Image: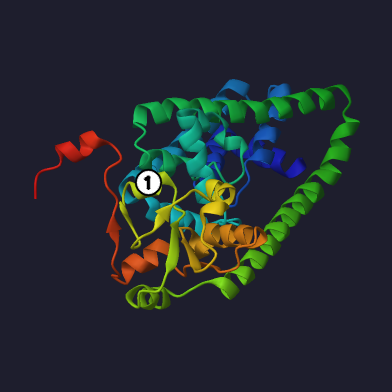
Amino acid sequence: MALPTHIVLMYGDLLLFAWVMVEQLGFPLPATPVLVAAGALSASRQLSFGLALAAAVAGSLVADSSWYFVGRRYGHHVLRTLCKLSLEPNTCVRRTQDSIGHRGAMTLLIAKFVPGLSTLVSPVAAQNGMGYAEFAIFDGLGAAFWVATLLAVGRFFGDLIRRDPSLLSWMGRFWLAVMLLAVVGLIFGRMVRRRIVMKQLAAARVEPEELKRQLEAGELVYIVDLRHPLELLPDPFTLPGAVHFSPETLAARHGEIPRDRDVVLYCTCPSEATAARTAMTLHRLGIDRVRPLRGGFDEWKRLGFPMDAIPPANPLVAAMEPAQ
């Protein structure tokens, strides 16, 4: 703990504000050891627990608010960019959307404790139409809970060290090594899993041009739209004749899927990850002719291929639309 403690002592609350803000913006600069070190220093009154808490929460709010307004303006394009920078892009968008869809603003209370959710939850909340006042209240509470927990852990160890100073030497010797090993192991494991999925995806996917030729030739193709309901709001269109399923219900309802034709799956995930995983699930259920669409919905749309409009889910919306 010697290195974080030295840095925190030198720069104080300003460091906590900047460090947490940079981490929450998505940079790989873990704030946990710095916050724990600050908590330990508060045990000996070298730092104020309250000021440290306020500074870190303020840094988190600045970063999260920035992502909120970027997400409100640029929508799912921001999510795709963030996921491409993520170590585990295969599940980041859908996991965040599902959490917001099921729990609403309550997701913000736990987001800081869930790897991969902290940065993404802000633009997803904006895309989902959450008002900024509601977002700021719940995000601030979640940040305060997260920061206070880490500071309290540091305070606990700080009290132990004050009673037995010999513990400081032991912790200083092993702290950095353990932290580095944990980070390296996490990165390596995620990279291996990502590589396996990418290889399986490359072997199975279908090109948009090939699918378009099949449709124009009148071939029977069963097309499945795997996008999350929130992704349908800015783009209320599907591929021609596509059926909308969530990946979870698709596996449960696999009996409805025909076995005598190609089954094409598409999403808006980076590298068609959701489609690839769902395709592998259906293969295990005995459906062999399953193929993810390369580039997913965004590539089909970019190429200008035909699409079907999705009727409004709420009849009041349709009634309010001007007559053509």
Q: Secondary structure at mark 1?
A: helix
Report the residue at 36% width, 68% height from top: 300
Q: Quadrant of residue 125?
A: top left
Which residue position is annotated with label 1?
Answer: 71
Report the residue at 34% width, 31% height from top: 131
Mark 1: amino acid: Gly
Tell me residue 178's x, y (percent).
80, 48
Q: Quadrant of residue 90?
A: bottom right
Q: Is residue 282 visible?
A: yes
**Looking at the picture, does residue 151 appear above or below residue 235?**
above
Q: Quadrant of residue 35?
A: top right
Given residues 253 and 53, the one toward you in this image is 253
Report the residue at 46% width, 29% height from top: 105
Mark 1: few/some/many CA within 10 Å (<14, 14-19, 20+)? many
Given residues 237 and 45, the one toward you in this image is 237
Tell me residue 71's x, y (percent).
37, 46
Q: How is the image coloured?
A: rainbow
- Asked if residue 124 lies left or right of residue 14, the reply is left
- Asked if residue 162 lies left or right of residue 318, the reply is right
**Looking at the picture, does residue 217 appear above or below residue 239?**
below
- Asked if residue 223 lies left or right of residue 252, the reply is left
Q: Is residue 55 visible?
A: no
Tell me residue 304's x, y (percent).
28, 70
Given residues 38 and 199, the one toward you in this image is 199
Tell me residue 67's x, y (percent).
42, 44
Given residues 293 and 97, the one toward you in this image is 293
Report the residue at 76% width, 40% height from top: 1
